[in-house]
Image (cartoon, helix red, strand yellow):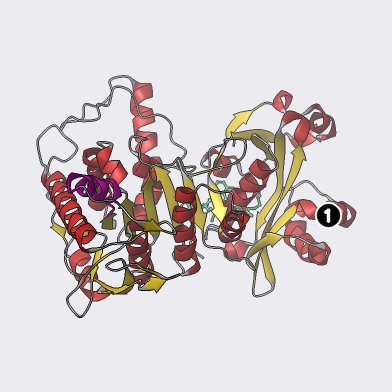
């Protein structure tokens, strides 16, 4: 299991720290200084966790058209400076359309896929050549007083992708439209080892020397899988996955992603991105992200903050994290009894666990239960309590607690809850690090307030979902 490092729910960076000056002036009041240092330290676990990991970052031609290239390149340069190995894949659909228009040629699509005739292939080459140069130029900036100062980035491109033709589908000959057949992983690794950013266009070549028009999503996903990337990140023209109420879905498991796609209600563009994210996760890429490029610093926010700004699709380890059933009561009791005995958890007893078993989620591995947590909803207040969060001592510190918390958060969101609270006597700092803030008992649902054993002197922590 690969888990995200501990949460960095960031306090806002101090306003006195300028974004684009070469010499950052330290804030002059103590509170701002402390906030800046806290903020920086909160990001440290992510920096350590992602060092030398491969991120594949892909964006469509629409992002370049929207004038977001320079700032995206600055963010990617920062990721690289933090030791992340970055492969960039660009799209060029609107730029191809523009080229076709200039040549008075029609675009032809079938089943959402471009039919690339000879003229269209010329347009693809023209459009992607131009974009590639623009990206290389953007990575070459190094002006003082900009985030690119001292970046000194080399960009490497090449014939890393072997393609094969789509062929004839449903009676339609797709001509020069292709799909990825093979990736030159060793050569890409060499380039990444030399600290270069690898840049790939949506073009591939066949052993017969032909060029094929590929989809940016296919290239990015295939590369992420081949390189066993830590993350596949699509910077998208859409906000991510938005539910029927217009709320952003921040996290999706493979299983929920599959169900969404099968439901057939997604917009075509959203479905294309999601399908590729799912394909990556199914092939063992731990996480794939769809994040809107119109948010400034979207990639940084997604990577270095706990909740991110888009939708993250995570590999399922279904047998690993699941909802509890009646057969799990005994194992849960074994897990929590020592903590009830030492006062960490409120004593509940078998009867209560049996009654509430459907509230529990558990982490299981090789038929052994390693951790559990329960969600008790208070729908009237749109609040939920996370209770009994426990991980066996020998598995602590591996991210299972964090994983359980995220799962409970997701369950709470799915039940329409907007706040999650916990009562704790010894674990306050763990929750603080994960975006909870302390509150008073009065903030809890009246029903819960009446049931609390006040002699325990528990502290209440709450998190906005
Ligand atoms: C709290 C608990 C569930 C965390 O589970 P976990 O799988 O170890 O958590 P993670 O791996 O996601 O996080 C580990 C980090 O939390 C820290 N941590 C663990 N217990 C902590 C505590 N009581 N207070 C503050 N930080 C704590 C670890 O030091 C580690 O920090 P690091 O990553 O900087 O090294 C687990 O320690 C546990 O079962 N504790 C006993 C039961 C308990 O206190 N439950 C909460 C009831 S309100």
Q: Is residue 336 visible?
A: yes
Q: Using residue 36 as the reference point, say whether residue 274 is left or right of it.
A: right
In this view, the residue farthest toward the top is: 29
Q: Is residue 49 visible?
A: no
Q: Quadrant of residue 427?
A: top right
Residue at 70% over, 34% down: 383
Is label 1 in a helix, a strand or a loop?
Answer: helix
Q: Is residue 99 magenta?
A: yes
Q: Is residue 205 above or below residue 291?
A: below
Boundaries of the magenta span: 90-103
Of residues 402 and 187, the one nearer the viewer is: 187
Q: Is residue 395 above or below residue 309?
A: below
Q: Main secondary structure of the magenta part?
A: helix
Q: Measured from the top left, where is residue 465 in percent x and y?
A: 59, 37
Of residues 280 and 321, the one nearer the viewer is: 280
In this view, the residue farthest toward the right is: 351
Q: Measured from the top left, where is residue 99 in percent x and y?
A: 20, 48
Residue at 58% over, 66% down: 317
Of residues 306 and 248, the one nearer the viewer is: 248
Residue at 80% over, 33% down: 448
Q: Measured from the top left, where is residue 407 in percent x and y?
A: 62, 51
Q: Measured from the top left, where is residue 227 in percent x and y?
A: 33, 69
Q: Circle 1 is placed at which residue position?
A: 353
Within 10 angstroms of label 1, few (less than 14), some, or many (20 or more) residues? some
Q: Does any atom of ligand 1 lie closer than 8 Å to the CB of label 1?
A: no
């Amino acid at each position: 299991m690969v888990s995200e490092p501990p949460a960095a729910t960031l306090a806002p960076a101090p306003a006195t720290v300028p974004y684009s000056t070469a010499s950052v002036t330290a804030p002059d009041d103590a509170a701002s200084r402390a906030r800046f240092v806290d903020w920086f330290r909160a990001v440290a676990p992510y920096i350590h966790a992602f060092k030398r990991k491969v991120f594949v970052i892909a964006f469509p031609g629409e992002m370049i058209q929207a004038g977001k290239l320079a700032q995206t390149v600055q963010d990617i340069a920062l990721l690289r400076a933090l030791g992340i190995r970055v492969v960039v894949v660009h799209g060029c659909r609107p730029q191809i359309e523009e080229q076709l228009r200039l040549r008075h040629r029609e675009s032809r699509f079938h089943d959402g896929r471009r039919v690339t005739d000879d003229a269209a292939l010329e347009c693809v080459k023209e459009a992607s050549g131009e974009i590639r140069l623009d990206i290389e130029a953007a990575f070459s900036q190094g002006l003082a007083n900009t985030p690119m100062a001292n970046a000194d980035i080399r960009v490497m491109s090449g014939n890393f992708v072997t393609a094969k033709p789509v062929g004839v589908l449903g009676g339609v000959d797709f001509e020069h439209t292709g799909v990825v057949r093979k990736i030159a992983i060793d050569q890409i690794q060499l380039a990444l080892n030399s600290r270069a950013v690898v840049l790939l266009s949506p073009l591939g070549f066949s052993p017969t020397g032909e060029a094929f028009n590929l989809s940016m999503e296919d290239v990015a996903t295939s590369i992420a899988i081949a390189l066993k990337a830590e993350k596949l990140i699509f910077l998208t023209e859409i906000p991510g996955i938005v539910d029927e109420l217009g709320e952003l879905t921040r996290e999706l498991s493979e299983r929920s992603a599959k169900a969404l796609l099968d439901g057939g209600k997604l917009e075509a563009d959203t479905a294309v991105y999601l399908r590729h994210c799912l394909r990556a996760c199914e092939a063992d890429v731990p996480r794939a992200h769809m994040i809107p490029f119109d948010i400034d610093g979207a990639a940084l926010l997604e990577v270095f903050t706990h909740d991110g700004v888009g939708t993250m699709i995570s590999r399922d380890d279904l047998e690993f994290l699941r909802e509890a059933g009646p057969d799990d009561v005994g194992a849960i009791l074994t897990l929590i009894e020592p903590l009830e005995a030492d006062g960490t958890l409120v004593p509940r007893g078998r009867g209560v666990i049996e009654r509430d078993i459907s509230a529990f989620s558990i982490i299981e591995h090789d038929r052994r239960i390693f951790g559990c947590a329960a969600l008790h909803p208070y729908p009237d207040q749109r609040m939920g309590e996370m209770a009994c969060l426990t991980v066996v001592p020998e598995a602590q510190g591996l991210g299972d607690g964090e994983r359980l918390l995220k799962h409970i958060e997701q369950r709470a969101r799915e039940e329409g809850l907007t706040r999650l609270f916990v009562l704790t006597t010894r674990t306050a700092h763990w929750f603080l690090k994960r975006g909870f803030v302390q509150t008073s008992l009065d903030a809890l649902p009246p029903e819960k307030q009446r049931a609390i054993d006040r002699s325990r002197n528990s502290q209440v922590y709450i998190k906005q979902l």
